[in-house]
Image (cartoon, rainbow, N blue to C red):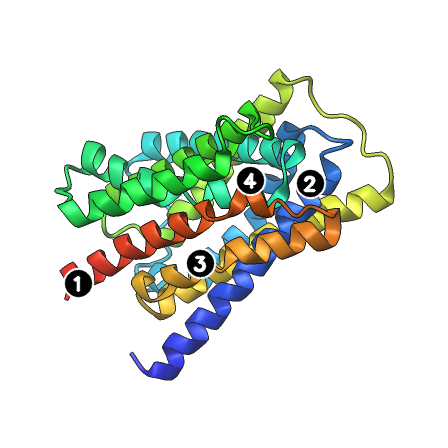
């Protein structure tokens, strides 16, 4: 892989982080007037468009005759429901705690992915990876801050979201190897729409969109999230994930800056040094994985 391609992939992945944070900022802004369940449903509906674009742009899908059938439909449906639940938890947290705190805690998904890989995939995890997991989890606990005056049980929401997102990542590896990732993503997004709409119904249904201004923000939210997923998929196809994952933790200071600029939040005492431990734990896991692959 040429060095320039790796650098371009890293740049694209960083842009995707910006769009993920923009989506989160819009969700936090809209959460005062619309429920997390509603916003999740809107996000998934608009997210179908970039998912379809990602599938159409997939060379693997075209080379295999534009296959639309998937053998493991049950797994697709379960993943879609898990995504809907993860979004509900994360979107709730964005409306209840500081933007940077919710985003930082969500980075603990790497901790859960290691545990789920052992339980569901039967992977053998060495001492270094478990040390990395423990370091990351200690960082999460420090950010959540049990015992501090600022601690709230709402901090458990992004933690639950991280666990659910990690579960979708691990279960993606259970699909047949010949099924394109873009096809799995499209179908999972479709079931996420069904799941999120059903959840919104259970939480009181949909309230009327108050203005064209709000509608514009809702559309922007879906488009920002969709672009973020698309860019992330493009970057992952350009180079190995181990080349990109360490840079994903730049999202932590980025979220801090966005929360400070747009909402006047500066939870410095809550985030550090816990956020650093989360990043260190994640990078240790990635470094160990890259050594094992070599």
Q: Residue at x 55, y 65 (%)?
A: 15
Label 4 or label 1, whichever comes before in sequence order: 4
- The reply to whether discs 2 and 4 touch (Cβ–Cβ < 8 Å) is no
Label 1 or label 2, whichever comes before in sequence order: 2
Q: CA distance from mark 1 to mark 3?
A: 19 Å
Q: Is residue 54 above or below residue 215?
A: below
Disc 1, SS: helix
Label 1 or label 3, whichever comes before in sequence order: 3
Q: Is residue 122 left or right of residue 159?
A: left
Disc ID at residue 28: 2
Disc ID at residue 282: none
Q: CA distance from mark 1 to mark 2?
A: 39 Å
Q: Which residue is mark 4?
A: 102
Q: CA distance from mark 4 to mark 3?
A: 16 Å
Q: Which residue is mark 1?
A: 291
Label 2 or label 4, whichever comes before in sequence order: 2
Q: Residue at x 55, y 57 (%)?
A: 253
- The reply to whether discs 4 and 3 touch (Cβ–Cβ < 8 Å) is no
Q: Quadrant of the N terminus?
A: bottom left
x then y, percent, for residue 65 = 33, 59
Label 4 or label 3, whichever comes before in sequence order: 4
Q: Which residue is mark 3?
A: 248
Disc 4, SS: helix
x then y, percent, for residue 81 = 45, 29
Q: Quadrant of residue 130?
A: top left
């Amino acid at each position: 892989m040429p060095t320039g391609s790796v650098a371009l992939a890293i740049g694209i992945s960083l842009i995707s982080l910006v769009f993920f944070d923009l989506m989160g900022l819009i969700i936090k802004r809209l959460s005062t007037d619309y429920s997390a369940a509603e916003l999740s449903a809107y996000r998934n509906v608009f997210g179908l468009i970039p998912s379809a674009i990602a599938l159409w742009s997939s060379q693997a899908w075209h080379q295999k005759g534009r296959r639309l059938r998937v053998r493991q439909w049950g797994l697709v449906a379960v993943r879609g429901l898990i995504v809907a639940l993860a979004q509900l938890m994360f979107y709730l947290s964005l409306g209840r705690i500081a933007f940077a705190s919710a985003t930082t805690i969500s980075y603990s998904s790497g901790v859960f992915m290691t545990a789920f890989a052992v339980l569901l995939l039967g992977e053998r995890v060495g001492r270094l990876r478990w040390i990395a997991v423990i370091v990351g989890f200690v960082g999460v606990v420090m950010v959540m801050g049990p015992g501090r005056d600022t601690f709230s049980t709402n901090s458990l929401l992004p933690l639950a979201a991280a666990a659910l997102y990690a579960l979708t990542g691990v279960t993606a590896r259970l699909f047949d190897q010949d099924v394109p990732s873009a096809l799995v993503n499209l179908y999972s997004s479709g079931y996420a729409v069904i799941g999120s709409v059903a959840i919104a119904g259970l939480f009181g249904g949909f309230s009327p969109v108050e203005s064209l201004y709000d509608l514009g923000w809702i559309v922007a939210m879906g488009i920002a999230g969709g672009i973020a997923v698309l860019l992330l998929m493009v970057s992952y196809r350009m180079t190995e994930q181990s080349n990109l994952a360490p840079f994903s933790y730049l999202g932590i200071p980025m979220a801090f800056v966005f929360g400070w600029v747009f909402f006047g939040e500066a939870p410095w005492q809550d985030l550090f040094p816990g956020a650093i431990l989360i990043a260190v734990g994640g990078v240790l896991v990635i470094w160990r994985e890259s050594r094992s692959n070599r």
